Image (cartoon, grey):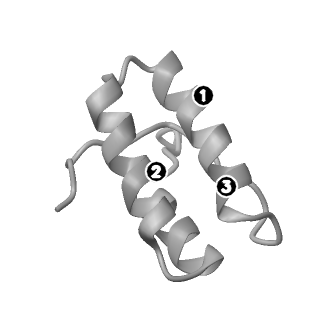
Amino acid sequence: MNIRKTLAWTAPPAASSRFVALASFVRAAEAQGWTDAEIQFVMDEVVEADSDAAGQAVLVSYAAPPTNPPRKT
């Protein structure tokens, strides 16, 4: 289950652990008004992941794609 919400957030380098990335994610989610239940849901997914890579993939799935300003022609 995905809560279908995205977060304006840039993931830390892949060399960091999923828990370092999770701490950064939680700070960004709180700043952007996510509810405690939404944050807890994502935290549970990350903690239950089989590896750091799988946990980070969960976090990245909630990150909003970067937006590029429209190009002037």
Q: Secondary structure at mark 1?
A: helix
Taking the spot 52% from the left edge, 78% from the top edge, the residue there is 54
Q: Secondary structure at mark 2?
A: loop
Residue 23 lies in what quarter of the image?
top right
Image side of residue 43 versus residue 52, left or right: left
Q: Work out whether 9 lies above or below 32.
A: below
Taking the spot 46% from the left edge, 50% from the top edge, the residue there is 63
Q: Nearer the viewer, mark 3 or mark 2?
A: 3
Task: Give the mark nearest the N terminus, 3 or 1.
Answer: 3
Task: Give the mark nearest the N terminus, 3 or 2.
Answer: 3
Q: Nearer the viewer, residue 63 or 68?
A: 63
Quadrant in which the N terminus appears: bottom left
Residue carrying label 1? 27
Task: Give the mark nearest the N terminus, 2 or 1.
Answer: 1
Residue carrying label 3? 19
Residue type at the position of mark 3: Phe
Q: Is residue 11 visible?
A: no
Disc 2 packing (10 Å; few <14; some 14–19; many ≥20): some
Residue carrying label 2? 63
